[in-house]
Amino acid sequence: MSLLVVGSVAYDAVETPFGKRERMLGGSATHFSLSASFFTDVRVVGVVGGDFGSEEMGVFERHSVDTSDLERVPAGQTFFWRGRYDFDLNTAHTLDTQLNVFADFKPKLSEASRRARMVFLGNIQPALQKEVREQVGGAELVALDTMNYWISTVPEQVVEAIRVVDVVIINDAEARQLAGEANLVKAARKILSWGPRALVVKRGEYGAAMFTKETYFAIPAYPLEAVFDPTGAGDTFAGGFMGYLSSHDLADEETMRRAIIFGLHRKNSLHSIYNSRFTIHGFITV
Amino acid sequence: MSLLVVGSVAYDAVETPFGKRERMLGGSATHFSLSASFFTDVRVVGVVGGDFGSEEMGVFERHSVDTSDLERVPAGQTFFWRGRYDFDLNTAHTLDTQLNVFADFKPKLSEASRRARMVFLGNIQPALQKEVREQVGGAELVALDTMNYWISTVPEQVVEAIRVVDVVIINDAEARQLAGEANLVKAARKILSWGPRALVVKRGEYGAAMFTKETYFAIPAYPLEAVFDPTGAGDTFAGGFMGYLSSHDLADEETMRRAIIFGLHRKNSLHSIYNSRFTIHGFITV
């Protein structure tokens, strides 16, 4: 019942219509593992620099997230992202990306990590995702996220990674871009033809949908009145989704539909914490 | 159980990634009344020019839509709209608007129209909407649609019209613009504070939501694989919604929730007909 996530652990500088923060704990593996930790045991594979503080490490510890495979490069700096959101908070504009120690990241999985039953390949270079997938040959369910940057620059590598996973978890726009199809049904059919048995589509404030070869499922999200910083919402959803599946050690269609609902719920619950991260503490204090 | 709609009857020229049509029957009152006619008796109040053909009139007749209050100005031309949709079909770009006979349109309601139990004020000048609303004093339920053009140019008139109706049916972006609030929950609260008891939010391919002062309801739409021309989808939804309410002569919350589902269903069903309008016939042949 252990869940493994491979992805970024980062510092984020974020500007929204509600304010500006210079240095907050972020990264896909961070958001994912904190969210999943409400359901199951999580191990995180990633890399940080010598600047990564004990306060930040404490956030993982308090959630019993296993960081044995979180590599530390003392001479390097942690991955850094700077972004800005406009009026509607829907689109992240990247202002700066400093890969730092992440540039040479080669995921090293311990024996325990290789035995994970469920694995989430967070948004990293797709060839690395494929490499990690090959190290967890016995996993029952492997899911993958990606983003427009990889789809634009190395589309064939993204497809190759998708060929070896069970579930793809991306947003509407990414699904359309990936398939080169404006129509979402056609896009889903194309992506599923590459091999995965399910495509989970994140729709931001609208909720989420799931396509399999034979079925379609969609659920709206409950609307939030206070959102100050949407960074990490997608990974938080994925963490709730995979955490729920892992805690049940099941991935049949019915359980996956329920997992989507729990993923949306976790996303909404964590927003209030992220709001306080943004407005008060400057980092996650859950 | 009669339903009245006031709105435009028009010719549309539409260009989408799938082709181009120079002259199709369109207009808010047209889409609304055809959709509602599957549920109830509909009367349409509007105006057309001398160029309005018998073939187009035949479309209303075949659906038993009462056109006694559809005024004809023999010396004038029918309202004309030219628009274009891009890749994702989500945004209509207006290329040309010729108001023609619609410029001097003063809705004249017959005695029978004034007795309508339910009324839909389609997207016309908001001061006219208010005027019509005053002519149907005994109506049990009056709903209103509007658009970004009126919200930008005469916002206070839009608010004045909203003050005298029961239900507002608009899309996400219009709700945000109208309330000057990026957050939809806050926007809904503000709009409801002006008087209506429900705000129905159209969300295109994502479905629809309804806010009342105490409740929230949302439902995803079933995704369509073939959409060639989205023109009129919002009015088709509103026609299904109001048609269902009218056929039950009820507008309690539960019936309204069901009506939203029927509205989405009608929108989807009519798309296939609209596709054939677009690809084969050049006008609606339902």
Image (cartoon, coloured by chain):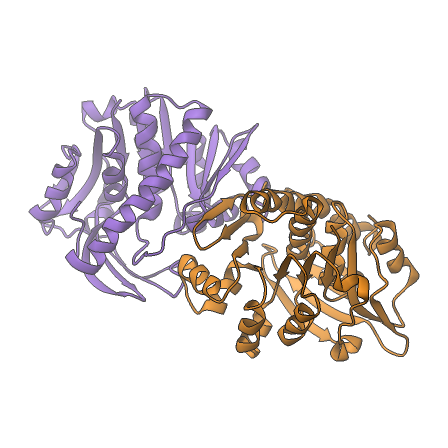
Chain colours: A purple, B orange
Q: Quadrant of residue A170?
A: top left
Residue lying at 63% horizontally and 60% vertically, measured from the top left: B142
- At x 37%, y 21%, the residue is A250
How many badges with numbers are in the image?
0
The quarter of the image holding the C terminus of chain A is top left
Image position of A163 with respect to B207: above or below: above
Q: Is residue A279 left or right of residue B121?
A: left
Kindly give the residue lying farthest to the front in the view shown: B138
Q: Position of residue A160 (x, y in %)?
A: 44, 35
- Specify whether B2 is left or right of A112: right
| Residue A247 in picture, x, y percent from top left | 29, 25
Camera-side residue of B179 and A173: B179
Q: Quadrant of the N terminus of chain A?
A: top left
Please tell me which residue lies in front, A257 or B117. B117
A14 versus A198 height, above or below: below
B159 left or right, relative to A82 = right
In-front residue for pair B121/A239: B121
Which x, y percent locates residue A62? 12, 38
Q: Is residue A124 above or below residue B149?
A: above
User: From where the camera sits, is residue B209 visible?
Assistant: yes
Picture quadrant of residue A7: top left
Name the image quarter holding residue B133.
bottom right
Q: Position of residue B239 (x, y in %)?
A: 69, 53
| Residue plotted at (51% across, 32% down) | A194
Q: Residue at x 30, y 58 (%)?
A: A228
Can you see residue B22?
A: no
